[in-house]
Structures are given as C-alpha cells and as structure tokens.
Image (tube, rainbow, N blue to C red):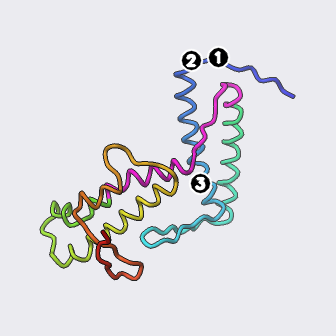
C-alpha cells in the first residue's frame, strides 16, 4: 500500500480548502443524479433531463476522475468530510422559506399595486395553508424555528384565518 505524506497546513487553510472542495462534491452529487436520469416533475417546478446516453457516460466519468483526485487531496491534506443531517437541511430550508410565503399574501403584495379583494379572498387562505404545512414539515424533522419568528407566527403576522383543503375549498378557522 502506498504511503501518503500528509502536508501540514493551518486550521484556517484546512477549513477553507475543505469547504470549497465539499461544495464541489455536493454539486457533483447533483450532477451525478442528473447523469443517472434524475428528473423532478412537480406542480411548479419541472426538470427535463435531455442528456444523451453519451453525455451521461462522459459526465459520470469526469465526476469519478474528480472524486479520485478529491480522495487523494483528502488524504494528503488531512481534510475531513462534512456530514449533513437531512433533517437539519429540511428544517433550515423550510424555516427560512416561510417568510417568502408570508410575503405572497395580499397584505405584502400591496407593494406591487392594489390587490383586488377577490384575489385577497382567494390567495390569503391558500397561502396560510401552505405556510401552516411548511411549518408542519419543519416540526416533522424535529427542528424549532429561530427566535425571529416561525411558520407558527404566520397566522398572527398575516391576520389570516381558516384553511384550504386539498380540493380548494375553504374551511373556517378552528379555534
């Protein structure tokens, strides 16, 4: 077995290199999924994977070459891999995104011009329901949002009441 000489480096250098190579590795993981045929087909987000079989093989081969070099760098520079807890990733993204949904209610859309009352009556309960369920996703993975607010605060901040069911009908607020 080939002995690897570890190059000494400061913690600051180790951290800076590790973070950058880790971000590259995370991106390569996504590219690998695409090369293996990943496509997402959701309501408002869709991916079309038009990579040819030849492109897929070439991408996978280059990813493997980069990962081989990254493994060698990890050993030579004594770099540690980062480990992501998927629950924390979900919690972080969902707890940060609820504000975007709040800003899609009629109260906040007034900054783009007058909001017709019919739009407010239609949109607000639906946004409240989306905010509520996003908060539930956050709780399902075990996180609690920050002190700056939470999806639970959305009803209070928006002043919205009620819930929209899956079929689009509105139920009154349950106190």
**What range is drawn magenta here?**
73-100
Q: Which quadrant: the N terminus? A: top right
Q: Residue at x 31, y 79 (%)?
A: 170
64 shown above or below 40: above
- Residue 147 position within the rendered picture, expressed as x and y whole percent measured from the top left: 34, 43
111 shown above or below 173: above
- Give the spatial CA distance, label 2 vs label 3: 31 Å
- Residue 70 position within the rendered picture, expressed as x and y whole percent measured from the top left: 66, 36
Q: Which quadrant: the C terminus? A: bottom left
- Residue 149 position within the rendered picture, expressed as x and y whole percent measured from the top left: 32, 49
Q: Earlier in the sequence, mark 2 or mark 3?
A: 2
Q: Residue at x 31, y 68 (%)?
A: 127
5 shown above or below 100: above
Mark 1 near mark 3, Cβ–Cβ under 8 Å? no
Residue wearing tag 1 = 8
- Point out the frontmost of discs 2 and 3: 2
Look at the numbered disc 1 and give the secondary structure of its residue: loop
The local crowd at label 2, few if under 14, some if 14 to 19, many if 20 or more residues have their Cα within 10 Å, is few
136 shown above or below 82: below
- Give the spatial CA distance, label 1 vs label 3: 32 Å
Quarter location, residue 6: top right
- Give the spatial CA distance, label 1 vs label 2: 7 Å
Residue wearing tag 3 = 31
The local crowd at label 3, few if under 14, some if 14 to 19, many if 20 or more residues have their Cα within 10 Å, is some
């Amino acid at each position: 077995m080939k002995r690897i000489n570890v190059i000494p480096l400061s913690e600051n250098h180790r951290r800076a290199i590790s973070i950058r190579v880790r971000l590259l590795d995370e991106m390569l993981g996504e590219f690998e999924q695409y090369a293996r045929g990943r496509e997402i087909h959701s309501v408002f987000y869709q991916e079309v994977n038009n990579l040819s079989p030849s492109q897929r093989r070439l991408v996978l081969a280059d990813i493997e070459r980069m990962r081989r070099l990254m493994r060698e760098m990890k050993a030579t520079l004594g770099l540690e891999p980062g480990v992501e807890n998927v629950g924390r990733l979900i919690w972080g993204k969902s707890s940060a995104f609820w504000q975007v949904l709040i800003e899609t209610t009629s109260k906040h859309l007034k900054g783009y011009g007058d909001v017709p009352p019919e739009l407010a009556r239609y949109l607000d309960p639906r946004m409240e329901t989306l905010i509520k369920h996003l908060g539930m996703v956050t709780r399902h993975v075990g996180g609690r949002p920050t002190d700056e607010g939470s999806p639970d605060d959305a009803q209070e901040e928006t002043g919205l009441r009620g819930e929209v069911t899956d079929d689009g009908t509105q139920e009154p607020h349950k106190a």
